[in-house]
Image: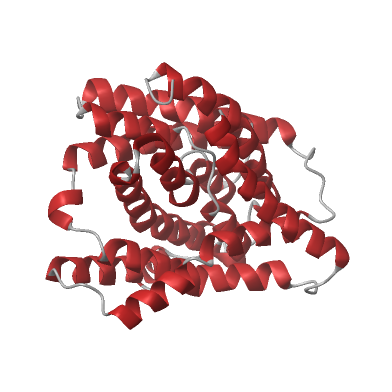
Amino acid sequence: MEAVVTIVLPVFGIIGAGYLAGRRGLLGEASSEALNGFVYWIAMPVLLFRAIATIDPAISFNGRYIAAYLLAAAATAALAVAVARYGFGRDRAQATLFGMASIFANTGYMGIALFVVAFGPDGTLPAVVTTVAMAAIVIGGVDALLTAFAGTGNRDASVADAVRALLTNPFLISAVLGFAWAFTGWALPVPLDTFCLLLGQAAGPGALFAIGLFLVGRSPRRDFGEVMALSVLKLVVHPLIAWAMLFHVFAVEPAWAIGGVVLAALPTGINPFVLAQRHGVYEERSSVTVVVTTVGSVFTLSVLLPAIGVGG
């Protein structure tokens, strides 16, 4: 539990710093949107490009693991969308973000850090592969769906609008460029690698700080039942479905299977909030979900890790 708390505390520290800055009015009224724009258009695509470009496809591509993890995510998201639509009466755009928040774990920051503690530096490959796969597939797809469903104000957006949004999505573009570079087998030039490293490292803290700014003046008790249902889906249902897929349906090798279950049990990451604020949909609930699931993960991970033989 100590390792989990140590990793969780910095997340709260950055959100808290953003909240205090917002309360004092240090950055102006539009600071959360501006910071999120920086994360969406610049820092996160650069981070994704470097993560993909610097991996060895021959070593990291575990097709059975990726299929099992993505199918578990798809099953959980489908269930979550149904809960949002028929349990809470949300429209398609809101339900899409509800579904994304139920599966998009904080693998990039908490996952990799936790794997270093639990498995050592050489055991982080499942966290890296999962981060890349989810970012490359889910973010661009959800962004396109939100363009079609919410249309950033235009509910009559056509399929062509969604396709156009997908093809011009900065995450998809950075992922394609990253994969293209990775398959060349070339190392990134040192200046480019350093540039991507420095700029990409701002993505996580920037989005967490933006969440803190956004939460100023908003009550976390609003729609708390919905947030709790979403938190249960993320912290309990998603890892259970991942466990079934990884261990039983696909029979993935144990080291990868254990890693996938741990990653599925992580709290909701920052990207659902980044997209929510970009489209002006489901902002408050997605931001509160990051906070609630991060708190809850201290307890769920402390039970899960010894149960599957990690850190026990």
Q: Left or right: 72 with respect to 219?
A: left
Q: Residue 165: in sight, yes or no?
A: no
Nearer-the-camera pick, 225 or 244: 244
Give residue 213's position: percent from left, percent from top.
Answer: 74, 61
Q: Quadrant of residue 224?
A: top right
Considering only vertical position in the picture, is 205 above or below 299?
below
Q: Position of residue 163 (x, y in %)?
A: 36, 66
User: How is the rendered protein coloured?
Assistant: secondary structure
Residue 29 sits in which quadrant? bottom right
Q: Nearer the viewer, residue 206 or 139?
A: 206
Image: 228 above or below 153: above
Left or right of residue 123, residue 181 in this image: left
Residue at the spot 52% in from the left edge and 30% down from the top edge: 235
Return the residue nearer the eye: 166 or 137.
137
Residue 305 visible from this viewpoint: yes
Q: Quadrant of residue 299?
A: top right
Residue 110 at what x, y percent from top left? Answer: 49, 45
- On the image, the x and y values in percent for residue 294 come to 61, 39
- Residue sticking out furthest to the bottom: 191
Q: Quadrant of the N terminus?
A: top right
* Image position of 139 with respect to 125: above or below: below
Relative to residue 43, is residue 309 depicted above or below? above
Residue at the (33%, 46%) spot, across then down = 121
User: Total marks drawn?
Assistant: 0
Q: Residue at x 30, y 79 (%)?
A: 190
